[in-house]
Amino acid sequence: MIDLNGNDYKEAPGGTHYRVGTPDGLIEALERARLNRFRIAVVYEGDSAIEFGRVGRSLGPTLKVPLLVHNARSTGGGEICTRIVREVRTAAGGHLLYSQAGDGS
């Protein structure tokens, strides 16, 4: 476990760091999307907007946090705020990968 500015992170298999308390099902869904390089749709709590992109990883020397990268030509993206992710689906086909309600595969 790593403490950075009062936030505790745990390292998932593969080297990506997630905030402590991130559900295992969400970690598995994001890591699967990152490793298989497919686009996902992310829905956050309290927000009806859907964000699309591929899961990337920051290049920090201490932490490598998950990023949502808009497309293959993008050079970066914002950190996926795993505390408030409500749902993750594949962008193509809408297959449910994770749901806060526990309905994901």
Image: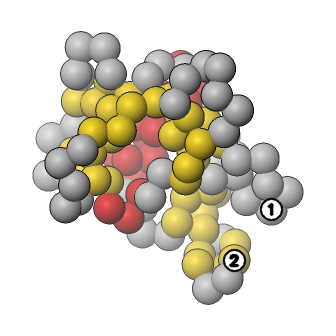
Above or below for 87 versus 92: below
How many tags in the picture?
2
Q: Amino acid at mark 1?
A: Thr
**Residue 37 locus on image (x, y percent):** 55, 20
Please tell me which of labels 1 and 2 falls first in the chain.
2
Q: Residues within 10 Å of mark 2 (few under 14, many from 20)?
A: few
- Circles 1, 2 touching at the beta carbon (< 8 Å): yes
Badge 1 marks a residue whose secondary structure is loop
Badge 2 marks a residue whose secondary structure is strand
Above or below for 65 versus 35: below
In the image, what residue occupies the spot 15% across and 41% down?
Answer: 103
In the image, what residue occupies the spot 44% across and 58% down?
Answer: 81
**Residue 9 locus on image (x, y percent):** 60, 68
Q: Amino acid at mark 2?
A: Leu
Q: CA distance from mark 1 to mark 2?
A: 9 Å
Q: Quadrant of the C terminus?
A: top left
In the image, what residue occupies the spot 64% across and 48% down?
Answer: 16
* Lateral position of residue 65 relative to residue 20, left or right: right
* Lateral position of residue 68 relative to residue 29, left or right: right
Where residue 49 sits, quadrant-wise, is top left
**Residue 2 locus on image (x, y percent):** 69, 72
In the image, what residue occupies the spot 61% across and 19% down?
Answer: 72
Q: Residues within 10 Å of mark 1 (few under 14, many from 20)?
A: few
Give the number of the disc on residue 4. 2
Q: Quadrant of the N terminus?
A: bottom right
Q: Which residue matches tag 1? A: 62
